[in-house]
Image (cartoon, helix red, strand yellow):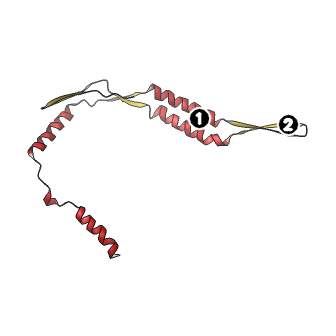
Amino acid sequence: MLKKMLVPAIAAVLATPVAGSAQPPQGAILQSAERAAVGMALQTGATRNWRSRSRTWAGLIMIAGGAVLMSGKKETVRCTGGDCVSETERYKALVYPGIGLAVTGVLLATVWSDIPANPHVDFAVTPDRIQVGKTFGL
C-alpha cells in the first residue's frame, strides 16, 4: 500500500507550485491589463436573438418527416383457400427513428433556431488603439 501511494504523493508535491517563487506583477503587464479592461468596458454588450427562418423551416420539415416515419404501416394479405384477408399493422422498425427525428425537429424549430444578431457595430476605444468590429450570425 505504501508503494502505491508513494509515487502519487511525490508527484503531487512536485506539481504544487511554491508560493514563494511567484513573481510580483510587473508594471507594464498591469498597465496593459488595465487598458484591456477599459476597452472591454466601452464595448456595447446589448445583443438580441433573432429566430432563424431556415432553421425553423428545417425543424418543421424534420417534424413532418418523423410523423411520416411513425405512421408507416405494413399491410399483409393472407389467402387461405378462396378467402383473402388483409391485415394492417404499424411498421415497428421505423417508429423509433421517426420519434427521434420529430424530437430533433422540435428542438431545432424552437430552442436551436435562436441566433445572436447585433445590429450595432462593436466599438472599443483604448489608450493605444481603436477597435471596430461586426459579428454575423447564421
Pointer 1: what residue?
66
| C-alpha separation, residue under disc 1 versus residue under disc 2 | 32 Å
Residue sitting at the far left:
27
Is 60 placed left or right of 94 in the picture? left
Up-down relation of residue 76 to residue 121 (above or below):
below
Pointer 2: what residue?
84
Q: What number of labels is visible?
A: 2
Query: Dividing the picture into quarters, in which one does residue 116 lie?
Result: top left
- SS at mark 1 in the image: helix
Which image quadrant: the C terminus? top left
Residue for point 63% across, 33% down: 68
Query: Dividing the picture into quarters, in which one does residue 114 lie?
Result: top left
Residue for point 11% across, 52% down: 24
Amino acid type, label 1:
Gly
Amino acid type, label 2:
Cys
Is 116 placed left or right of 72 in the picture? left
Query: Dividing the picture into quarters, in which one does residue 18 lie?
Result: bottom left
Q: Residues within 10 Å of mark 1 (few under 14, many from 20)?
A: many
Place of residue 80 in the rendered image (x, y in percent of width and height, measured from the top left): 88, 41
